[in-house]
Image (cartoon, rainbow, N blue to C red):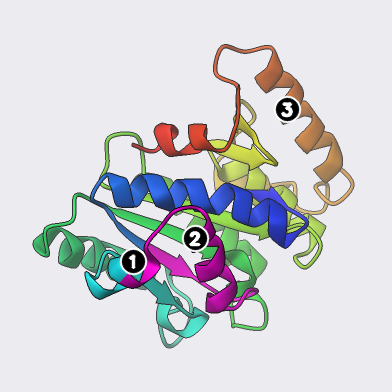
């Protein structure tokens, strides 16, 4: 998702988490930019019994330190961690895992932009339609570099802008995106406009953040 305000971000995240809880999935929220109390209050307003969900282990809140594994940032180490988290959730009776991740966790955290783009692309090999794990990667377009956001958008199969869900017809592999590094800063607004315009003219576009939940079931 791409957003510029807390209100916009929460309007995207709350339905995604609510649907996951209703499906019996374990939902993990990686809080970084926002306090857990802020997110919890919005979940409660969205009709979620946060205290009950946390007590049952169906809802967890992580920090950047819980999510970012120690040492040098490596795709394989992150993959093993995510798959271990999934397996632990399944063993406890959850039907799957949903991770909602505030991408500001990467700021000043030893994660190079190139490695992050590779990781975001790599996620598609473990999170895909029919798998038991899904991610909502939340990019604040004000706090993260526009170059990074532009590159990250290209490797995601679906982009959420406001309440509009856009199948990404311009998706590219990470290495191809990185080869054109530097051309995305000026093109971020153009890319967002094109994705929304293409969504408007395709059968796959939908308005309303509830649709995002359906896309990852």
Determine the secondary structure under disc 2.
helix
Task: Tell me the tag on residue 59.
Answer: 1
Task: Tell me the tag on residue 43.
Answer: 2
- Comparing labels 3 and 1, the label whose residue is closer to the camera: 1
Q: Quadrant of the C terminus?
A: top left
Picture residue at 55% right of the left edge, 77% below the top? 37
Q: Which residue is mark 3?
A: 196
Determine the secondary structure under disc 3.
helix
Q: In front: 100, or 23?
A: 23
Question: Relative to 177, does residue 194 appear above or below in the rendering?
Answer: above
Is disc 2 in contact with disc 3, using a CB cutoff of under 8 Å? Answer: no
Question: Relative to 145, does residue 201 appear above or below in the rendering?
Answer: above
Q: Residue furthest right?
A: 186
Other residues around mark 1 within 10 Å, as few (<14) / some (14–19) / many (≥20): many
Is disc 2 in contact with disc 1, using a CB cutoff of under 8 Å? Answer: yes
Mark positioned earlier in the residue sequence (2 or 1): 2
- Comparing labels 2 and 1, the label whose residue is closer to the camera: 2
Picture residue at 43% right of the left edge, 32% below the top? 215
Question: Relative to 168, does residue 22 appear above or below in the rendering?
Answer: below
Q: Which residues are magenta?
A: 28-51
């Amino acid at each position: 998702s791409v957003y510029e305000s807390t209100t916009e971000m929460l309007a995207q995240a709350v339905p995604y988490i609510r649907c996951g809880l209703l499906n019996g999935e374990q939902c993990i929220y990686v809080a970084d930019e926002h306090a857990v109390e802020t997110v919890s209050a919005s979940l409660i307003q969205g009709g979620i019994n946060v205290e009950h969900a946390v007590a049952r282990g169906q809802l967890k809140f992580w920090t950047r330190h819980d999510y970012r594994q120690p040492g040098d940032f490596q795709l394989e180490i992150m993959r093993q961690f995510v798959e271990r988290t999934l397996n632990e959730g399944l063993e406890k009776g959850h039907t799957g895992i949903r991770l909602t991740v505030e991408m500001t966790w990467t700021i000043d955290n030893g994660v190079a932009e190139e490695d992050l783009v590779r990781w975001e692309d790599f996620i598609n090999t473990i999170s895909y339609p029919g798998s038991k794990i899904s991610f909502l990667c939340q990019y604040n377009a004000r706090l993260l570099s526009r170059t990074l956001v532009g590159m990250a958008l290209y490797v995601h199969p679906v982009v959420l802008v406001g309440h509009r869900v856009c199948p990404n017809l311009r998706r590219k592999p990470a290495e191809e995106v990185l080869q054109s590094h530097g051309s995305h800063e000026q093109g971020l607004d153009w890319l967002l406009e094109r994705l929304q315009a293409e969504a408007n003219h395709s059968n796959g576009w939908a308005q309303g953040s509830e649709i995002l939940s359906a896309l990852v079931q």
